[in-house]
Image (cartoon, rainbow, N blue to C red):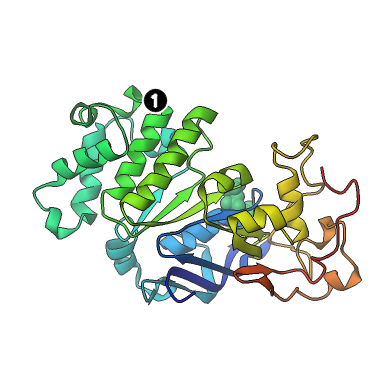
Amino acid sequence: MNDALLKVSNLAVSIRGDEGIARILDRVDLEIPRGRIVGVVGESGCGKSTLIKAILGVLPTRARIDAGEIVFEGRDLAKLPPDVLAREVRGAAIGFIPQDPFLALNPVFRVGTQMLETMRWHAPPQWKGRHRERLVELLRAVQVPDPERALERYPHEFSGGQRQRLLIAAALSCQPRLLIADEPTTALDVTTQQQVLMLLRNLVAEFDLSMLFVTHDFGVVAQLCDEVSVIYAGQTVEAAPTRRLINEAAHPYARLLLACHPDRATDLGGIPGSVPSPFAPPQGCRFHPRCPIAVADCASARPIIEQTSERHDVACPRYRLPLPQGATP
Ligand SMILES: Nc1ncnc2c1ncn2[C@@H]1O[C@H](COP(=O)(O)OP(=O)(O)OP(=O)(O)O)[C@@H](O)[C@H]1O
């Protein structure tokens, strides 16, 4: 699609560690069309956070982008100087909602002080002199009760769900075009999680945004996302519109991950085995050691991405085969 707000192509990121060099992301592709919510799903250790860090330009010092592009509004973020990224992109054109609302706010400063400080650096010039007023409007939009008073309170005076709303307002406070959320509902109870997801959906429409939502939970993807990309051991294995992926997942990893979801599984055993270390990933398809339909060829060559239908890509030549009985948890 031409109207992508963000297009990540062929992105490779490696990190130098004591064990050698780890290829954490190995030619990842991702597209976020304007006005859409795209989920990135994968187990812990698949590279979701590294993908976010690469987009935001906050990779660890020992990491580097080896190849690929991160094109956002026509500019390749992978090639932008760090000061331009910090000034014009991170926390400005791209807002970030972190995973843990308990850790993300400084407990010793009032909420308003912290949020106004962010706005001082990144808010659009036309809001000059109106930061507090804008903030109150945003707190109202994220349904924080009594916004004027909320700005005078300290983080510990809010519940987890309210703190997450504060962080969503903070992410919106610089008038971003893209929101990136890293499992923002994981630390919340189920009811609050539902409310925050619904709020995010409404805000994306109301503020004319796009969103990248990272999670390990297909249930959350089903509720929130228009499209989804499944990532395994640093490689994109499948991408499709959400409904299609949930009803017709093709890659064995995506099928097994879906089968593990509580709504479907009778026994939540998870997928046997674990995500390989990026310091010594398997050759060929990185999923082949855990794949119930793998054959010898899967260990020798990386699968080519095939398009099964419009906007549905899968990186497995054997995706048409059924999984053997007992393979799903
Ligand atoms: N600074 C680092 N040094 C060495 N290895 C790292 C570093 N950061 C990440 N990794 C490794 O890269 C892989 C991907 O990590 P990443 O945090 O991106 O995965 P993730 O899918 O976000 O996992 P989680 O859901 O647990 O946050 C993991 O194997 C992790 O151990």
Image coordinates of residue 93 in percent, x first then y, are 31, 61
Judge by depth and name the residue closer to the eye, 225 or 292. Answer: 225
Left or right: 260 as drawn, with respect to 68: right
Q: Determine the image quadrant of residue 121.
A: bottom left
Q: Is residue 279 above or below residue 186?
A: below
Image coordinates of residue 226 in percent, x first then y, are 52, 56
Q: Quick one: quadrant of the C terminus? A: top right
Q: Determine the image quadrant of residue 107.
A: top left
Tag 1 secondary structure: loop
Q: Residue at x 33, y 57 (%)?
A: 208
Image coordinates of residue 233 in percent, x first then y, are 68, 59
Left or right: 323 as drawn, with respect to 242: right
Q: Which residue is mark 1?
A: 159
Left or right: 214 as drawn, with respect to 303: left
Left or right: 263 as drawn, with respect to 189: right
Judge by depth and name the residue closer to the eye, 66 or 264. Answer: 264
Q: Determine the image quadrant of residue 190.
A: top right
Q: Is residue 130 above or below residue 175?
A: above
Which residue is at the far left? 129
